[in-house]
Image: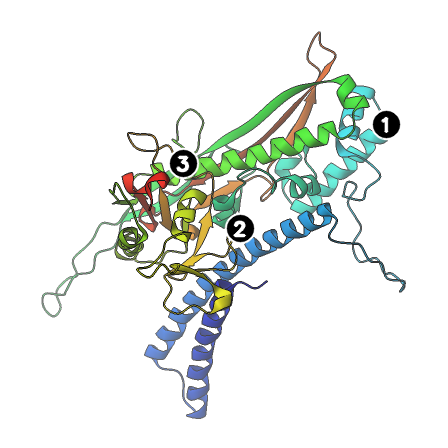
Amino acid sequence: MNNQFLTNLHETRSAKTSLIDATLNRAADETRDITEIELANIQALKMEIEKLDERIEQITDLEVRKAKAAELAASVDGHETETRSAAPARVTREEPTYHERSNFDFLADAIAAEFGGSYDAKERIARYQNEVRIEKRDSSTSNFAGLVVPQYLVDQFAPLRRAGRPVADISTMRPLPAAGMTVNIGRLTTGVTSYVQTSENSAPTESSPDDTLLTVNVRTIASMWDLSKQAVLRGTGIEDQLLGDAIRSYHTLLDGQIINGAGTSGSHLGILNTTGINATTYTDASPTWAEFFPKLVAAISNISSNFYGGATHIVAHPSIVGCWLRALDSTNRPMFNSTAGNPFNAPGTFDQPGYFSGLQILGLPVIQDANVPTNLGTGTDESAVIVGDFRESYLWEDNGSSPLYVRFEQPDGNIAIRTVVFGFSAYTAGKYPTAFSAITGTGLIAANWA
């Protein structure tokens, strides 16, 4: 993985670790214990290292996902050939019941077990469900009247041909509790106040800290369709294709909810509609990069001023990112340059333009997400740019990042099979709303950019 941002994180972590080692070595060389100031510095550095470790883990996971998607695309296009070694093999991990090279089809077995009474199919389905429970260590799968979709089907279809879930994947992910329809977070809203002692031997002034419960609702996203038994039993791969599209649809809708969900009628409350986030308005009938850039800096600065932290990502619709990439300076040179050319004094750089590109602005990775709305404003033609510390974007899902279940039914009176795909999740950006900034306004109408 060649990600300059990830490399910088590792280098920063190494530098902070070296500072801790240098402090300890100096105390050892001087045959003394570390001082209170040195101890405080070490503790502060350890906290910074822990935060860096979280970011490294998240970015590494994102890079691994991108690599898997590229590897899958290459194999589908025929650009990758399988090679086998003649050396003796040693089994280190047993394949699950259903996988890419399995002789058994998950959906065919599920339908045969449900409607055909096949003992072998029922045994394989039961064995796979037990494998999932052992692997996930999550009792919720055993307490639910549905089938967990094999991960290889999710991996095979989820990254393709839909907007996907870029923002969901950079959020902090947590397993959804096994029961209940809410997730509760305690927020300290009134802290302890420090006062100056007025005189010696006087009593300290008392403060009254208080907390507020943040309740996050568990939401359900689902799809349902009927398919004739002829198509299922005599077609080739039809049910796989439909299930794959349902999975893509599920993740795309979830990602869109995280960005712009209204929090009503069963939807998540998304970042753009969370009360208390920083707001920056960019009003411009003929927007340019030079005029937009100060607004972007203001959005980043608002996070530092109000959250006392730093942004980790910039999120924008691909049409807006395209406006940035085509920006030219006064001598018609591109403002954004490829990292391969070692650009000097460029406001932004990229590895390769594309949906999963490595574009960076002010050292922050830019996430292109087609789920960012483009119908905002009075003219329903404005987009938004979100800047935030996405470590404070919290997503709870069943079974990690693949919370999908599938259930088969037989509609009364129809020679058909009804498939239902659904999953549960909870989301909030409300723990620290000021960790996010939204730039909106007429300056974010992509068609108006020079």
Seen from this angle, which residue lies furthest bottom? 30
Seen from this angle, which residue lies furthest top? 413
Q: Which residue is mark 1?
A: 119
Q: Which residue is mark 2?
A: 356
Please, what is the three-letter code of the amino acid marked with disc 3? Pro
Look at 29% across and 55% down and name the residue there: 290
Measured along the vertical axis of the image, is residue 420 above or below residue 434? Answer: above
Look at 48% across and 43% down and name the residue there: 395
Q: Between disc 1 and disc 2, whose residue precedes? A: 1
Q: Which residue is mark 3?
A: 373
Seen from this angle, which residue lies furthest front? 331
Residue 317 in view in this figure:
no
Measured along the vertical axis of the image, is residue 96 above or below residue 329? Answer: above
* Nearer-the-camera pick, 41 or 337: 337
- Measure the C-alpha gap from mark 1 to mark 3: 49 Å
Please, what is the three-letter code of the amino acid marked with disc 2? Phe
Give the colour scheme shown. rainbow
Frontmost of labels 1 and 2 is 2
Numbered marks: total: 3
Determine whether the residue tagged by mark 2 lies in a helix, strand or loop. Answer: loop
Q: Position of residue 368 (x, y in %)?
A: 46, 47
Q: Which mark is residue 257?
A: none
- Measure the C-alpha gap from mark 1 to mark 2: 45 Å
Q: Position of residue 36 (x, y in %)?
A: 34, 78
